[in-house]
Amino acid sequence: MKKDFRKAKNIKPACFTVLAVLFVVLFSGLLSSCSKPLVIPGASTGYFIWKDDCSNIHIVWSGDRKERNFSGVIKTDGDFTAVIKEGIEDEDKINWSAKEISFDASLNPEDYSDELSISVSKNSFIDFNLKLDDKYDFSRIHIGKYLNNPSSEEFRIDDLYFENLRMISWYNSHPFIEFFNKLYSNKYLTFIYVFLLGAILIGLLRITKLSGLRKKVLITGLLYFILFILDVGFIILLWYANGH
């Protein structure tokens, strides 16, 4: 009995691990910062734009340890009152006036990222025109906490853009909404796929943590029941995220 009790105690960490993995996948968006996107210098490539709690606009350009050129023009109908440079080298060109900021900067294998922190006043919008290696690449321009991409070469962020972005539920934000739309369009296949993944995890538990237990069948059945409930809950989340 003691041996079985000790083995049963080992089930709990394994079950918690399975549940933790599922919940991390479903709710990873909640772990993001309220405004700042996750930027990993040396791995994240492109532009990252956000607004901090002091209403300063930050623009970071980050490379992937290759020779990269970043250039652009930023304009406003208000006034740029200050531009703070972080990581900017002497050879990088940064010019700014009350209405316009222009830059032409490079990154290399030893230089991972640069940043501009911009203070602006009396504005209703800020226009951006950004290039990577002298080309437009919208997929490399990320705005806000959920990394929204622009749809045009010159794009505008109005004064309430980030405030409105914070009001959008994480599952209705980029890139979750596109991902959830695809999953829900094939909801039956998604249900089967998630269930199979869970069944594989339960199978691994049966031959490791559950082997030798007298109540192995009962515990395995309970795990399958939990998996079914989680799978149904995930489909309901997809249904709700798609506007139902």
Image (cartoon, rainbow, N blue to C red):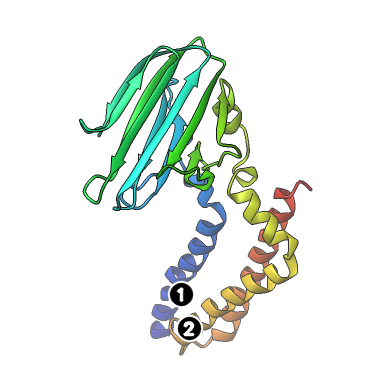
Horizontal and vertical percent for residue 49? 45, 34
Q: Is residue 109 above or below residue 70?
A: below
Q: Quadrant of residue 168?
A: top right
In the figure, is residue 166 to the left or right of 33? right
Rendered residue at 53%/83% (across/down): 203
Using the image as rendered, state which of residue 92 and residue 117 is in the foreground: 92
The one of 125 and 154 positioned closer to us in this rendering: 154
What residue would you read off at disc 1?
11
Q: Secondary structure at mark 2?
A: loop
- Residue 191 image offset from top left, x and y in percent: 69, 69
Residue 119, compared with residue 163, is above or below; it is above
Q: Which residue is mark 2?
A: 210
Q: Position of residue 150 (x, y in %)?
A: 57, 38
Q: Earlier in the sequence, mark 1 or mark 2?
A: 1
Q: Secondary structure at mark 1?
A: helix
* Disc marking residue 232: none
